Image (cartoon, rainbow, N blue to C red):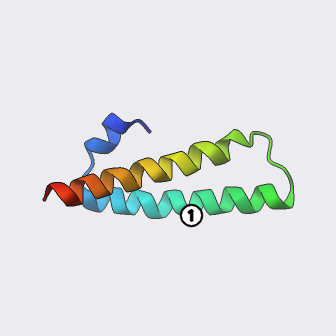
């Protein structure tokens, strides 16, 4: 998901997206710790997406 797509979402939508992405990130880390997943770069992409969402949430909170 690109930054431009995140900027178009409302604060509530971003918070819901953050919850689902954090769950996804946790599942990826858990799956990788048990047996290495095929593409470990997915973990990095997921972590960065969580950070992008958190940054956008913070920016929207500050702009209020």
Q: Foreground: 59 or 34?
A: 59
What residue is shown at x 53% (from left), y 46% (from top)? 48
Q: Is residue 50 left or right of residue 23?
A: left
Number of disc labels: 1
Which residue does the numbered mark 1 point to in the structure image?
Answer: 23
Pinpoint residue 56: horizontal percent, then vertical percent. Answer: 32, 50
Task: Please state, as top left, top right, bottom left or bottom right, where the N terminus lies in the image.
Answer: top left
Picture quadrant of residue 35: bottom right
Would you say 38 lies left or right of 57 here?
right
Residue 26 location, x and y as percent?
64, 63
Can you say which quadrant of the picture contains the C terminus?
A: bottom left
**35, 44: nearer the viewer:** 44
Residue visible at 59% across and 58% down? 24
Above/below status of 28 relative to 52: below
**Residue 57 percent across, percent down from the top left:** 31, 56
Q: Residue at x 22, y 54 (%)?
A: 60
């Amino acid at each position: 998901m690109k930054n431009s797509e995140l900027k178009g979402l409302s604060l509530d939508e971003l918070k819901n997206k953050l919850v689902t992405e954090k769950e996804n990130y946790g599942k990826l880390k858990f799956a990788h710790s048990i047996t290495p997943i095929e593409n470990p770069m997915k973990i990095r992409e997921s972590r960065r997406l969580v950070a992008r969402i958190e940054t956008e949430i913070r920016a929207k909170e500050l702009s209020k």
